[in-house]
Amino acid sequence: MEKFQICGGKRLSGEVEISGAKNAAVAILPATVLVDGVCRLENIPNISDVSTTLKILKSLGSQIRYINKNTVEIDNSSLRIHTVPHDLARHMRASYYFIGALLGRFGIARVSMPGGCNFGVRPIDQHLKAFTSLGASVSPMESGMIEVVANRLVGNSIYLDIVSVGATVNAILAAVKSRGLTIIENAAKEPHIVDLANFLNSAGADIRGAGTDVIKVCGVDLLHATTYSIIPDQIEAGTYMAAAAATGGDIIIHNVIPKHLESVTAKMQEMGVVIEEYDDSLRVYRSGQLIHCNVKTMPHPGFPTDMQPQISVLLSMADGASILTESVWDNRFRYVDELRRMGVQVQVDGKVAVFQGIDFLTGAPVKATDLRGGIAMVIAGLAARGVTDIEEIHHIERGYEDIVDKLANLGADIRRIVVPNNLVSHAL
C-alpha cells in the first residue's frame, strides 16, 4: 500500500492550477451514453473516479480515445450493453448516473447499488421516484442489482421530496429523450447540475432552468456530437484556500469561478483570511490569528458539505469555540477521531461538532476515512508540528489530481511512500 508523509509547519506560497470538477465529470461522462456521435470532453480531471467511470463506459462498449490526460473522445455509437458490472459500480456512488443514461438510451438499465464514501444511509428513493414518474418500472435483482425498464419514457412533473443532486441529475438524464415536457421541482442548484445541462444542450438537448429549483426538460429524439470543457472544481479550489489559511500561507489559485466559491469565501473572510478575487483566479493569504465562527452546511448556494471536513481544520486552530453543523448527510464526522490524534479538541453530538481552538496541531499517524475527510488530514498535516503519516490515500485520489506535486510546488514537504503490507499500521 501507499501513504502520504508530511513534515508540517511549512508556509504554502506560490501558484496552483485547479483541475476540472470531479462532480461534473462523473455526471457528464455517463451522459455521453445519450449522444449519437463522438463527444470530446476537455478539462477532465485525472482522478480515480473518472478512471472508474471510463472503465464502466468501456465495459458497455464505448470507444474511448485519450487525446491527453485531461482530454478524451468518447464514441458510443456501437453501444449495446445496458448492464453496469458490479465490480466497477461498487467503487463509486456516481455509478448510479448510468441508470438514467441507459434508461434514456435503451429503455432499460441494470445497475448495482452504488459504492463510494460511507457516511450514512443515502437511499436512492428520489431517483426511483423520478424514473417511475416518467413511466418506468423498477425491480430488485440478485446481488444488489436493480433493473429499471420503460417501454417509452413520457414527460411528467417530478417533485423531489428533498433537494438531491443525484436525483436531479438522474431525472435530467432520463428526461432528455423522453416524449414531451418534464418539470423537475425542488431541484438541486449546484454548479455541476448547470454544467451537465450545458453539456447536454451543446449536443442538442432542450433543458432550461438549471441552477434554479425548477428545471424544464423538453424531450428530443437525437443528441449530436459535441465538444465540451468541464468547469473548474470548486471543492478542489476551496481545499487549497483552506490549506493556505491553515499554514498562514499566501497562494494564487488559478482556473476558478469565484462565484461558485462565494459561501466558502465568506466564511474564510469571517475567520480573518484575506481573499482577493480576479476574473478566474483568487489570492488567499493569512498573517493573523484565525477567528472562531459557526458554520452550517446547506445545499447550494449554501456552504457545501464537501468543504465541511476542510473548514473543520481551520476551526480547530481558531481562537475560541466554533460550532460546525452538518445538515446534509448523517455520520459525516467520522474523520474527527483522526483529528483528535493530532490534538484537536472537538465534541460531536449527532450532526453538530463543537471545536475549541488550540495553539497548534501535532503530527501523528492517521488515515483517510473518506475522500473529503482524507484531504482534511492532509491540510492538518501541512499545518501541524512534526510528521504526519496518512494511510488509506486511495480515498483522497478519488477526487484530487496530482495532489502531491501541486502541494510540493507550493512549498509543502510531502511525499508518497510505498509501505510493505506486513508493515501496515494495525493501530489504525
Image (tube, helix red, strand yellow):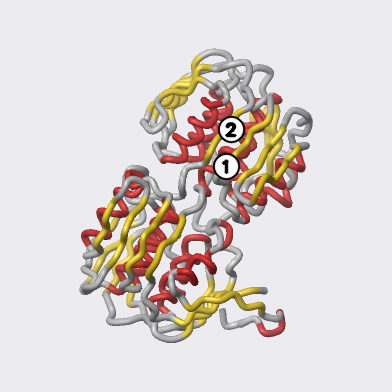
Compared with residue 89, is residue 286 higher up or lower down, i.e. above or below? below
- Quadrant of the rendered structure where residue 331 is? bottom left
Q: Nearer the viewer, residue 406 or 35?
A: 406
From the viewer's perspective, tell me whether residue 162 is left or right of residue 55.
left
The amino acid on which the numbered mark 1 sits, given as a three-letter code, is: Glu
Image position, residue 41 (x, y; %): 60, 39
Using the rendered view, name the quadrant where residue 48 is placed. bottom right
Q: Going from the N terminus, do you reach mark 2 or mark 1 first?
A: 1
Quadrant position of the C terminus in the picture:
bottom right
Q: Which mark is residue 42?
A: 1
> Helix, strand, or loop for circle 2?
strand
Q: Nearer the viewer, residue 267 or 427?
A: 267
Quadrant of the image containing the N terminus: bottom right
- The number of callouts visible is 2
Amino acid under disc 2: Thr
> Which residue is labeled 2 in the image?
227
Q: Residues within 10 Å of mark 2 (few under 14, many from 20)?
A: few
Residue 349 visible at all: no
36 lies above or below 194: above
Q: Sort mark 1 into few (<14), some (14-19) or many (20+) by Cα contacts within 10 Å.
A: many
Residue 378 in the figure: left or right of residue 13: right
Relative horizontal placement of residue 246, taking residue 49 as reference (left or right): left
The reply to whether the C-beta atoms of the residues labelled 2 and 1 are less than 8 Å apart is: yes
Question: What residue is drawn where x is 33% and y is 77%?
Answer: 345
Q: Is residue 12 in view?
A: yes
In what element is the residue under mark 1? strand
Image height of 322 relative to 55, above or below: below
Name the foreground residue: 204 vs 49: 204
Please provide percent x and percent y for residue 383.
38, 76
Q: Find the distance from the CA under tag 2 to the CA under tag 1.
A: 8 Å
